[in-house]
């Protein structure tokens, strides 16, 4: 098959890649870009181990043609960290034992990131529905649900500080000189 050159934006970086028309996103991520966090578990989008975000929406990379992703922002587990530190959901998975063998963890984390972006305060039913497309063969899921609840609580406790910081920046007019007070004044 004749290869075609495409521009692919992954984790904030643009890559020029020559692909075959039938190339799958998972293969390009793992083989061409060496981003091996997304896993191949089923090849038919039934396990969720390959989940990535495409323009913020959880998608299964094992059945997604990479050519259809041109012009979109792809985020893998390698791109989830925040300012060089673990994201709240990653930290919570470690703290609460949400990851057993770790094979499925990237897919679960990406699915939860997508859920929390569209619904910052999901109910238990919302979480269960979002994760219904992800499978884990090691755990009974309870630790994962605890980790997700802890991540949501961590995000909520961090929000007031961020909002206060943003408000203090707004008071300076253009945000160029931040107000030094983070608290309420």
Image: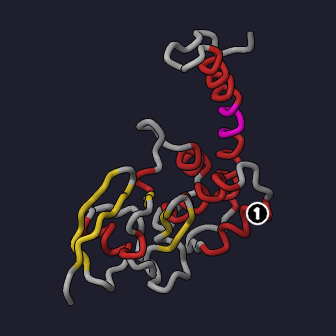
The x and y percentages for residue 62 are 43, 78
Residue 155 on the magenta segment: yes
Asked if 92 appears above or below 169 in the picture, the reply is below
- The residue carrying mark 1 is 126
Structural crowding at the residue carrying mark 1, measured as other residues with C-alpha within 10 Å and reported as few (<14), some (14–19) or many (≥20): few
Question: Can I make out residue 101 in this image?
Answer: no
The secondary element bearing badge 1 is classed as helix
* Nearest to the observer: residue 71 or residue 90: 71
Asked if 136 appears above or below 74 in the picture, the reply is below
The x and y percentages for residue 56 are 55, 58
* Nearest to the observer: residue 25 or residue 178: 178
Please indicate whether residue 163 sits to the left or right of residue 75 in the image: right
Quadrant of residue 14 within the rendered picture: bottom left
Majority secondary structure of magenta residues: helix
Q: Say how the picture is coloured.
A: secondary structure
Residue 59 on the magenta segment: no
The x and y percentages for residue 119 are 71, 54
Quadrant of residue 125 within the rendered picture: bottom right
Please state the extent of the stretch shown in magenta in the rendering: 154-159
Question: Can I make out residue 103 in this image?
Answer: yes
Q: Quadrant of the C terminus?
A: top right
């Amino acid at each position: 098959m004749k290869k075609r050159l495409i521009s692919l934006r992954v984790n904030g970086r643009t890559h020029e890649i020559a692909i075959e028309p039938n190339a799958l996103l998972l293969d390009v991520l793992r083989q061409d870009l060496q981003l091996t966090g997304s896993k191949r578990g089923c090849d038919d989008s039934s396990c969720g181990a390959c989940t990535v975000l495409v323009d913020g929406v959880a998608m299964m990379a094992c059945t997604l043609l990479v050519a259809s992703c041109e012009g979109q922002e792809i985020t893998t587990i390698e791109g989830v960290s925040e300012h060089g530190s673990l994201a709240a959901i990653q930290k919570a998975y470690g703290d609460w034992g949400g990851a057993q063998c770790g094979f499925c963890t990237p897919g679960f984390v990406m699915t939860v990131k997508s859920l929390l972006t569209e619904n910052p305060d999901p109910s238990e039913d919302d979480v269960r529905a979002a994760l219904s497309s992800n499978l884990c063969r090691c755990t009974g899921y309870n630790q994962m649900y605890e980790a997700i609840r802890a991540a949501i609580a961590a995000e909520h406790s961090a929000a007031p500080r961020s909002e206060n910081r943003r408000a203090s920046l707004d008071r300076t007019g253009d945000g160029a000189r931040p107000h030094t007070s983070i608290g309420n004044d």
